[in-house]
Image: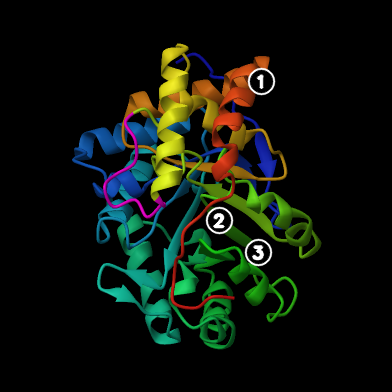
Amino acid sequence: MAAVPSLELRPLGNTGLKLSSVGFGASPLGRVFGPVSEEEAIFSVGEAFRLGINFFDTSPYYGGTLSEKMLGKGLKALGVPRDQYIVSTKCGRYKEGFDFSAERVTRSIDESLERLQLDYVDILHCHDIEFGSLDQIVNETIPALLEIKKAGKTRFIGITGLPLGIFNYVLDRVPPDTVDVILSYCHYSINDTTLEDMLPYLKSKGVGVITASPLAMGLLTESGPPDWHPAPPELKAACKTAADYCKEKGKDVSKLSLQFSLSNKDISTVLVGMNSVSQVQMNVSAAKELEAVGIDGKTLSEVEDILKPVKNLTWPSGIQQV
């Protein structure tokens, strides 16, 4: 097989890890966006690795544990040494609901490792913490994750969620170097760049930054978001106008959106959900085009103008506002 030039690798905070600029979001392998065969799931993981993606993210919540199982099979089929790829999974959010208790998250990692067919994960994230008590996260969950880390079942600890204030709340209340990474979604895309304001703060804490949903969970696609998308109607309408505009001009709003998210090098990796070989190839191709020739500045500027009235408009998530 001809060697494929690797994707750009970026450091993740103080972890020493270097993540491919595009990360493989494995939630679609849990069939959360439609059917995916086991064969296609395994091929997708293999193609991603072949093309230079070294970071794979999942959760027991995705597809009620199916995503972890499928990713585990895909990684095993690679037949390469474990240190050749980086895996993150999550705890605290399950098909049955949320449980951030020390007992549950301690049990959770063992279940995840069994499904992933791994001895350890590189990052264990506390999943969507805005749905729990943030004080419980600080005083009970994170100490439990530190014990898991001590036991060698994860190398690093992360927290995830939608409202950005949750990250400050937790990071300001735990000892330095306790939380190694945050995973934010829907806050670094063409329509919403609020994560950017937090980057200096996160850097000062030595915390690595992963962003997900560069397409804003389907808003910035030609086909549009799923029916359940929580965005307000005016945001959906503006994004549809932007997508239609790109299509008329023979441009791809999804590619533009991914390239926009990839352009900020202070973000270690951009997680994109993938469930087919063709999706993997498309995303890697967009990243390599960005590295080689840069972004289409004219179209980006036009799309930003369309989205200006709804810039940084978001939606509520969770039970505790901070």
Quick one: 190 or 232, which is closer to the camera? Answer: 232
Kindly state the secondary structure of the residue where label 3 is placed. Answer: loop
Residue 65, given in percent of the width and then of the height, sits at 27, 60
Q: Nearer the viewer, mark 1 or mark 2?
A: 1
Q: Quadrant of residue 158?
A: bottom right
Identify the disc placed on residue 77: none
What amino acid type is highlighted by mark number 2? Ser
Question: How far is the residue under mark 2 from the one under mark 3?
Answer: 14 Å
Question: How far is the residue under mark 1 from the one under mark 2?
Answer: 25 Å
What amino acid type is highlighted by mark number 3? Asp
Q: Which residues are magenta?
A: 223-232
User: Can you identify the residue that label 1 sits on?
Assistant: 297
Question: How far is the residue under mark 1 from the one under mark 3?
Answer: 34 Å
| Horizontal side, residue 287 vs residue 132: left or right | right
Quick one: 140 or 55, which is closer to the camera? Answer: 140
Kindly state the secondary structure of the residue where label 2 is placed. Answer: strand
| Horizontal side, residue 77 vs residue 322: left or right | left
What amino acid type is highlighted by mark number 1? Gly
Instruction: Specify which label sits upstream in the sequence, 1 or 3.
Output: 3
| Horizontal side, residue 17 vs residue 258: left or right | right
Kindly report the secondary structure that dominates the magenta region of the rendered protein.
loop
User: Can you identify the residue that label 2 sits on?
Assistant: 184
The residue sitting at 59% across, 51% down in the picture is 210
The residue sitting at 46% across, 67% down in the picture is 128
Residue 24, given in percent of the width and then of the height, sits at 45, 41
Label 1–label 2 contact, CB within 8 A: no
Q: Quadrant of residue 282?
A: top left
Look at the image and say whether residue 23 sits in the magenta stretch: no
Seen in the picture, residue 128 relative to 244 is either above or below; the reply is below
The residue sitting at 31% across, 44% down in the picture is 28
Label 1 crowding class (10 Å Cα cut-off): few <14, some 14-19, many 20+?
few
Identify the disc placed on residue 180: 3
